[in-house]
Image: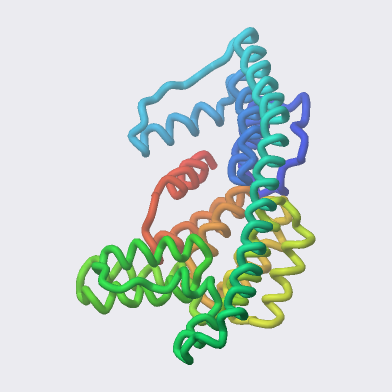
């Protein structure tokens, strides 16, 4: 039942067995499609899936969660379906207006920022003759650099936290500098060990320019909007210009993975790992892909490598191990 297979279809099939619906529930879950996973789970529970019950019991036992096996009767099953349809309808009504307002806010912010930049440049040109050479040199610096320069006087723990925040924002050089500062201030401590591990396994190795960071963020925004062609264009351009920069490979692989294009995603992740074998996030996504394909041994190997490099939440490993125990 849990043999390796292709990604699930975009639309939930009809007239499958309860165990087949459980398998689809697992695959949709690993692909990040929560609504489809819930729909498949409802059908699996309504048919009293044997695999589903065994998996739930194993997971509760290994994670310490109280066992509460749910079996739906026909009325309960239809109530769950009605709730899911209502949830879908609510999302259809709420999400489009929310996205419109969000995009309009971004447009207004960009226009306001451009207007401010234009006014500032006009004011700078008008007062150029009265400025000293030092002042002129400072004003010539990009404003983005002046705003986000690494602050002084923080503790090692604060630099560690700041380095992680910089990484989440896509500010690579600042993340590298902040994590290095944390190690300098508190060598041979747990803080230094965490900073060193995070720098090794989460942050790109090469130092890149602000322009490269901005191009990567542009591609990431296209990816977040599910605009795969535009994201691919940006990331492939970065791969061509900066072949040792890990993030374009990771981001495009993630976009392919979410779109169900597993072979393309695995190809990019393997390429990334040939550049940097210690990239924990690449191993983590690879584990999710193998789990979605129900290639459980490969998923176990990948998640074990990810946790070896950067120990975090073991929940993913528990889920994969429980699937392995069903075979």
The vertical placement of 97 against 104, above or below, is above
Q: Is residue 231 left or right of residue 134?
A: right
Image location (x, y in percent) of residue 224: 65, 53
Image location (x, y in percent) of residue 137: 50, 87
Q: Residue at x 56, y 51 (%)?
A: 296
The vertical placement of 1 against 126, above or below, is above
Image quadrant containing the C terminus: top right
Image location (x, y in percent) of residue 229: 79, 60
Q: Quadrant of residue 263?
A: bottom right
Evaluate whether residue 249 shows in this view. no
Q: Quadrant of residue 152?
A: bottom left
Image location (x, y in percent) of residue 58: 43, 34
Q: Residue at x 72, y 69 (%)?
A: 234
Looking at the rendered structure, the number of numbered marks drawn on it comes to 0
Image quadrant containing the N terminus: top right
Of residue 280 and residue 53, the one placed in the foreground of this image is 280
Evaluate whether residue 296 shows in this view. yes
Q: Residue at x 69, y 46 (%)?
A: 104
Q: Quadrant of residue 162?
A: bottom left
């Amino acid at each position: 039942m849990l043999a390796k297979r292709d990604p699930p279809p975009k639309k939930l099939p009809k007239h499958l067995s309860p165990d087949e619906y459980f398998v689809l529930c697992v695959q949709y879950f690993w692909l990040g499609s929560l609504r489809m996973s819930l729909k498949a789970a409802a059908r699996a529970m309504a048919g009293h899936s044997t695999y589903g019950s065994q998996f739930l019991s194993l997971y509760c036992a290994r994670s310490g969660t109280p066992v509460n096996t749910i079996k739906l009767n026909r009325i309960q099953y239809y109530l769950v379906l009605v709730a899911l349809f209502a949830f879908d309808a609510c999302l259809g009504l709420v999400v489009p207006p929310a996205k419109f307002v969000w995009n309009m806010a971004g447009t207004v912010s960009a226009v306001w920022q451009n207007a401010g930049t234009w006014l500032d440049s006009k004011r700078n040109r008008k007062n150029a003759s009265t400025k000293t050479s030092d002042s002129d040199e400072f004003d010539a610096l990009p404003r983005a650099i002046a705003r986000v320069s690494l602050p002084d006087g923080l503790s090692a723990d604060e630099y560690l936290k700041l380095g992680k925040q910089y990484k989440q924002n896509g500010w690579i050089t600042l993340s590298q500098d902040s994590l290095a500062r944390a190690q300098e201030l508190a060598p041979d401590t747990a803080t230094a060990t965490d900073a060193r591990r995070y720098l090794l396994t989460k942050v790109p190795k090469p130092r890149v320019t602000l322009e490269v960071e901005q191009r990567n963020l542009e591609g990431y925004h296209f990816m977040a909007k599910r605009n795969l062609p535009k994201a691919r264009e940006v990331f492939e351009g970065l791969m061509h210009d900066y072949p040792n920069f890990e993030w374009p490979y990771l981001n495009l692989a993630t976009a392919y993975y979410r779109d169900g294009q597993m072979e393309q995603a695995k190809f990019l992740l393997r390429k990334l790992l040939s550049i940097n074998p210690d990239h924990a996030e690449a191993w983590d996504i690879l584990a999710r892909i193998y789990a979605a394909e129900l290639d459980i041994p490969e998923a176990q190997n990948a998640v074990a490598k990810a946790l070896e490099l950067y120990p975090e939440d073991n929940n993913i490993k528990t889920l994969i191990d429980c699937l392995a125990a069903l075979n």
